[in-house]
Amino acid sequence: MRNILLAATTVGLLTGCGKSADTLAPAKNAQVLPITDNHVMLAMPGKSNPMDAMMRSMQGKPMPRGAAMQRMHERHEGMEQIGKSFKIAGRTLKSDTPDLAQVRTAAATIALLASRTPTWFPAGTGQNVGKTRAKPEIWQRPSDFVAKDTALRQAAAAFDAAAKSGEMAAIQARFSDLGKACKACHDSYRSE
Amino acid sequence: MKAPVWDLPVRLFHWLLAGLIGFSWWSVKFHHTDWHIWSGIAILTLLVFRLLWGIFGGSTARFSSFVRGPRAVREYLRGDGSWRVAGHTPLGALSVVAMLVAVAIQVGLGLVATDPDGLYEGPLAQLVSLDATDTARDIHEYWFYVLLALIVMHLGAIVYYRLVRGQKLTKGMLTGRLALDPGVAPMRSARWWVALLCLAAAFAVARWVVAGAPPFSP
């Protein structure tokens, strides 16, 4: 059953993702996504771009507790991994002789994880369910939150592209943009 | 009869430190981490200045005049609580040293810390590993409560002096003058240009730290 849903989602993503800025290799992403609320993704297969899917998952029926805890754990680990990669990239970019391979690995990791963020904030994964720094405001202002998440995914993809190009000035600029995208969201939606 | 007890550099140091600690708390709480870091560097400058002023400053500012051993503190506590020298009492001196050390530790941790997202880091963070920058931040966050405890004790002592002993210490720290018992020698001032030299040296040290402490910077 799960496989069928996954395949259907993949098809939905493939057919629905015309807007390239929003998605990075959609088929590949669909396979690594540990999707457990496929019903949300499949509700409108023709329109399942990440922004719409995220919006629906945030406004839909709250997840059952067990699945919610699992999703929150995945979110926590993912955010931590993004942070770690960002710091590794930052450290080498600040040195006199930046290690391009290190930057590329970090940028790819961040872009991949950022592409999963639309699935990280379904309804029912807030502070009333478990220990999390995700503020309730996330689900009170979903359109703003989705916009900030989209900005993150675009910034992560741009940083990844710059890293692949190897052009240092572009890498530094996109790295700085990415940091701003992190901060914009964390300042409003992450508690102390 | 009021006599000079605290010189101007001591008073400026005290109030600037109090203000900057408040500003440091506020700026990081409200996501102005860049201001927070500059505030910490300003506090570093103050600390270096105070260290030098504790050697070359006015009589009541000098560590040699107020830092005393545990026996002096014990004797002072056994006595009737009077203190016949202008400046810190032995117990007050203990509090001064504790606060200076605690603030120095807090600044030191901040210099090598990074914020959780890796967007901001202290000027010396590049000297330690990424894990160490995270650990430094964790301790830096908890250490604030040590500072807070010392500040609360400090304020408690001021309230005690005001209510029980009828002495306005806060006003004394503003004007620099306090009532002294007859026969107690007042403060002996240092020359004003010594303060400028200490300040210049403090700026130089802070500037060097901001630059990543060459030649140790990577």
Image (cartoon, rainbow, N blue to C red):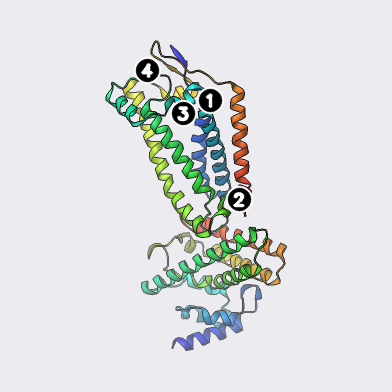
Q: Which residue is mark 1?
A: B57
Report which residue position mark 4 lands on: B84
For disc 4, the neighbor class at 10 Å (few under 14, some 14 to 19, many from 20) is few
Which amino acid does the dot numbered 2 rest on? Answer: Phe
Q: Earlier in the sequence, mark 2 or mark 4?
A: 4
Q: Are marks 1 and 3 in contact (CB under 8 Å)?
A: no
Tell me the amino acid under the disc marked 1: Gly
Q: Is residue B197 or residue B146 the one in the foreground? A: B197
Q: Position of residue A40 (x, y in %)?
A: 48, 78
The chain letter under disc 3 is B
Task: Label 3: state its secondary structure.
Answer: helix
Q: Residues within 10 Å of mark 3 (few under 14, many from 20)?
A: some
Residue A135 versus residue B166: which sits nearer the camera? B166
- Seen at 56% across and 62% down, the residue is A144
Which residue is label 3 attached to? B63
Q: Of marks 3 and 4, which one's residue comes earlier in the chain?
A: 3
Above or below, B157 against A36 in this view is above
